[in-house]
Image: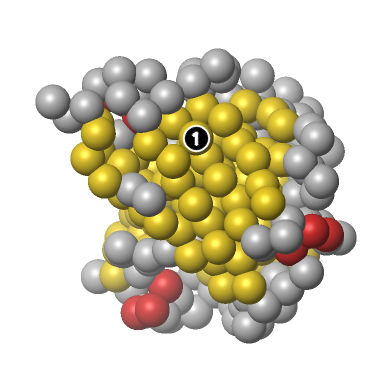
Amino acid sequence: DIQLTQSPSSLSASVGDTITITCRASQTIDIYLNWYQQKPGKAPKLLIYAASNLQTGVPSRFSGSGSGTDFTLTIRSLQREDLATYHCQQTYSTPWAFGQGTKVEIK
Amino acid sequence: EVQLVESGGGIVQPGGSLRLSCAASGFTFNRHWMHWVRQAPGKGLMWVSRINTDGTRTTYADSVKDRLTVSRDNAKNTLYLEMTNVRADDTAVYYCARDGLTVRAFDSWGQGTLVTVSS
């Protein structure tokens, strides 16, 4: 089974900062990597699919990149409403594993 | 508007059974593969199972195989998860999620239903 490792597990940043979250796969997954945002007490929401494609309605300050085994989610000009846990997910092969999540806090 | 509404969660004893439902609306249900994902308290997301559009193909995570069964009724626009012989580590919020038509990602999620396995 493919394993996903996210780093860091948590981070604290200020409004206006740029932050980067990484997701590393245990084997190549081409571009089959998605990113989800989960606000406290809520269901996850799709942000980025196929590594770099912004889901409809998601602000352009969110972006994704990578292929193969290494991927990044970047949030530019961090806003207070970005307080959430961010999860990566591979859909290259079942079981469609998720990373362990990265909790983003606002200073 | 796409809506997925789970129901059926609650407290169940170890070894017991429970059926979760996910009522879909606002889209053509029978065109989408569907998934169940769970999240134990304070933990990350875990993919549980998936089912194809007509219900003839299913896939499961190893940890739930032979105990959880996914099914669907396209006439009722409803997805199900039958849980049997439940264990303490099945305690979680269970989400149903829609597979995108053109993207291999979960583009809509329900609000989740909590299953607690406890004696």
Q: From the top left corner, tell me how far across and down residue A3 is, in percent.
A: 59, 26
Question: Farthest right residue?
Answer: B102
- Return the residue at label 1: B82
Q: Chain of mark 1?
A: B
Q: From the top left corner, tell me how far across and down residue B118 is, in percent.
A: 17, 29
Q: From the top left corner, tell me how far across and down residue B57 is, in percent.
A: 79, 33
Task: Classify mark 1: residues with Cα within 10 Å, few (<14), some (14-19) or many (20+).
Answer: some
Quadrant occupied by the C terminus of chain B = top left
Vertical placement of residue B19 versus A81, above or below: above
Vertical placement of residue A80 versus B111, above or below: below
Question: Does residue A13 appear anywhere in the picture?
Answer: no
Residue B99 location, quadrant: bottom right
Q: Secondary structure at mark 1?
A: strand
For the image, the number of numbered tags is 1
Residue visible at 80% across and 49% down? B53
Residue visible at 45% across and 46% down? B20
In this orientation, which residue lies closer to the viewer: B70 or A2?
A: B70
Q: From the top left corner, tell me how far across and down residue A24 is, in percent.
A: 61, 35
Residue A69 location, quadrant: top right
Q: Is residue B10 left or right of residue A34?
A: left
**Mark 1: amino acid:** Glu
Q: Is residue B114 left or right of residue A74?
A: left
